[in-house]
Image (spheres, rainbow, N blue to C red):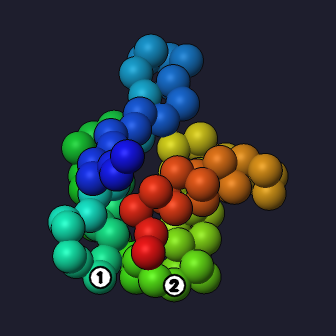
Amino acid sequence: MKIYKIKLAGAIDRKTGLPIAFATIHRVPGSDQITVTISDADGNDRQHLVEADSPEDVFSMAECLQERLDGCRGTNSMIHDYYRLLQNFSD
């Protein structure tokens, strides 16, 4: 099985009942980079390009995803959940 695109919704804001952020992770077949787009609740997008063959770059993106989607700096195990998800797009 090969995954090419995943869409994620972050933690729910108790005031609005909506996710605090969204993320789209995708990789075009043959590309050397994973594209991660993080959108906040106001619709502001930020795109990140991650080197698919760099475990350090992938882990750094996992840290960023975890903090933005969960709304707090997480534990190592929380970050590893995102890292394992990103590994589906790695070389």
Q: Which residue is mark 2?
A: 54
Q: Nearer the viewer, residue 68 or 88?
A: 88
Residue at the image position 58 percent from the left and 79 percent from the top = 55
Cα–Cα span, label 2 and label 1: 10 Å
Label disc, if present, on residue 69 of the rendered structure: none
Position of residue 31 in the picture relative to residue 74 (left or right) = left
Residue shown at 52% from the left, 51% from the top: 85
Q: At label 1, which amino acid type do we have?
A: Asp
Can you say whether 27 is above or below 38 in the image? below
| Left or right, 64 with reference to 52 | right
Residue 6, by quadrant, is top left
User: Residue shown at 40%/38% (left/top)?
Assistant: 8
Say which element carries label 1: loop
Between 79 and 10, the one nearer to me in the picture: 79
* Image quarter in which the C terminus is found: bottom left
Mark toward the start of the polypeptide (2 vs 1)? 1
Residue at horizontal 53 percent and vertical 72 percent from the top = 58
Residue 31 vertical placement versus 42 (above, below): below
Q: Which class describes the residues within 10 Å of circle 2: few (<14), some (14-19), or many (20+)?
A: few
Disc 2 + disc 1, Cβ < 8 Å: no
Give coordinates of residue 73: x percent, y percent: 71, 54
Q: Which amino acid, by three-letter code, is at mark 2?
A: Ser
The residue singled out by tag 1 in the image is 32
